[in-house]
Structures are given as structure tokens and as C-alpha cells.
Image (cartoon, rainbow, N blue to C red):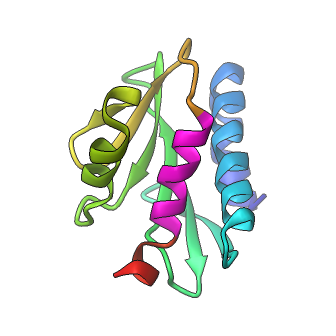
Amino acid sequence: MSQDVAAVIRDYPAVIQKKLLFLRELIYRTASELVEPVELEETLKWGEPSYVTKPKTGSTIRIDWKRKFPAQYAMYFHCKTTLVDTFKEIHGDKFRYEGNRAILFYLDDEIPVAELKDCIALALTYHRRR
């Protein structure tokens, strides 16, 4: 884990750390399971843990928690893409969405892992498919 990302996650409540680390693991697992696996660079963008494909075959995925909404955390996608609209079309109400930029999770949510991995895969291959 990047030192910068580790420092940000360490600053969150323990329950949020666990949730974000689960999302992080899912992003890496999905990247390695693609038909053409992708390498990820872990960095901070806007102070949030971010995952960028190397080379640029996909769209950046960010994960974060906001103190303003302590019971929720999110996986963010570039708002200028069609990714979240595609997720809505394919997975409908399996997720809660924030406009065209995020999938929202609450602390007590049961995450539909297969469907979330599908969303992650679509993001990680976004430029490859365009």
C-alpha cells in the first residue's frame, strides 16, 4: 500500500478502515482477474485513495469516506464518463448512486460483490472499450 494512502486510511475510524480496505482488495482482485489483467498505480487524487491503470486503459476509481456523512462511504468514478449510467442500466437498484459519479454504501450494507466487481471491471477497461 502506498504510504500516502495508508496515512489517509489510518486517519479514519476502524470500521471505515475495514470497509475501504475491502473495496481496495476488490479493485486489485478484479484488476488481476480481467481477461487482460491491468496493473494499478495507487495514489491520492483530491486527497482520496485512487487507483489508476497503467497504461491508461481504464478510468480512475477512487474510494473515500466523508466525516460529514459518517455512516456512508463510496466508490467514485470520473463524472465525465458514462460509467455510472452504465452501472444503473445493467444493475439497476442493486446500488445507491450519487448522480453520475459514485456508488454509495452504508455501514450495514450487504455489498453485492459480483455486481460491484462488474462495475470495477467496466471502469478498469473503460478506455480499452471506447
Front residue (pair 79, 3): 79
Q: Is residue 88 left or right of residue 37?
A: left
Q: Give the range drawn in magenta.
A: 113-124
Main SS of the magenta part reads helix
Residue 86 highlighted magenta (yes or no): no
The quadrant of the rendering that contains the N terminus is bottom right
Q: In this view, does 38 lie above or below 89?
A: below
- Tally of marks: 0
Is residue 93 in sight in this rendering? yes
Q: Is residue 17 above or below residue 34?
A: above
Q: Position of residue 123 (x, y in %)?
A: 46, 63
Q: Is residue 93 left or right of residue 116?
A: left
- Residue depicted at 55% across the width and 16% down the height: 107
Q: Where is residue 106 in the image (x, y as percent from the top left)?
A: 48, 19
The quadrant of the rendering that contains the C terminus is bottom left
Q: Where is residue 2 in the image (x, y as percent from the top left)?
A: 74, 62
Q: Is residue 119 left or right of residue 117?
A: left
- Residue depicted at 72% across the width and 29% down the height: 18
